[in-house]
Image: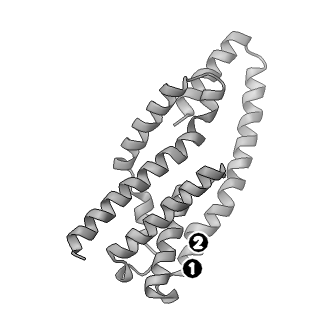
Amino acid sequence: MDLSLIVVVVIVTALAFDFTNGFHDTANAMATSIATKALKPRTAVIIAGVLNLIGAFLSVEVAKTISSGLVDDTKITPTVIFAGLVGAILWNLLTWLLGLPSSSSHALFGGLIGATWVAAGADAVKFAGVISKVLLPAVLSPLIAGLIALMATYLAYRIAAKGADGTVKKGFRYGQIVSAR
């Protein structure tokens, strides 16, 4: 197959991954704002779509992480990237269909690491980087976030307990809109 055709297929597949990433993450980002009626569903989806599109152009952190220390860059080909993207898309769709929470970034990591392993062997995967950049953060971040959320919730309740009911509800409504994305 012609290399330029493969590159076009990879770009289209990357856009498809971005689409699955967007609708996968929108549910997580907007559920609270919709459930509490801080935002109407249509407005929430539009906000999420616009911000996800802007974010795709502003952040390359996932690409930097993948390209620095997880796999041997010399073993990566457009075909490997395509296979990794397809794996990540399928994982996003499966977890979405089953209603399971999952990270699209980690799906991409797993897809590319797996595709690299199949294409170039286990020696092409830098397992120390996988542990330090993917596995440890995946385990530690929910624990750290849970502790911070516990403290923030406690403080919010303490502060809100002294406020007027209407002011508190209005403040929480605006806070949910701002924090939704």
Please tell me which residue is depicted at 54% across the width and 47% down the height of the picture.
24
Please tell me which residue is depicted at 72% across the width and 55% down the height of the picture.
143
Element type at marker 2? helix
141, 81: nearer the viewer: 81
Percent of width and height locating residue 22:
47, 46
Residue type at mark 1 is Ala
Please tell me which residue is depicted at 71% across the width and 42% down the height of the picture.
149
Percent of width and height locating residue 161:
78, 20
Percent of width and height locating residue 173:
61, 21
173 shown above or below 9: above
Q: Residues within 10 Å of mark 1 (few under 14, many from 20)?
A: few
Number of callouts: 2
Q: Is residue 70 visible?
A: no
Mark 1 and 2 residues: CB-CB less than 8 Å, in contact?
Answer: yes
Decide if residue 123 is on the left or right side of residue 59: right
Tell me the residue that label 1 is attached to: 128
68, 3: nearer the viewer: 3
8, 175: nearer the viewer: 8
Decide if residue 63 is on the left or right side of residue 125: left
Element type at marker 1? helix
Tell me the residue that label 2 is attached to: 132
Cα separation between marks 1 and 2: 6 Å
160 shown above or below 136: above
Percent of width and height locating residue 91:
56, 61
Q: Quadrant of the N terminus?
A: bottom left
Residue 158 sits in quarter: top right
111 shown above or below 94: below
Residue type at mark 2 is Ser
Q: Residues within 10 Å of mark 2 (few under 14, many from 20)?
A: few
Q: Is residue 58 visible?
A: yes
Please tell me which residue is depicted at 27% across the width and 70% down the height of the picture.
6
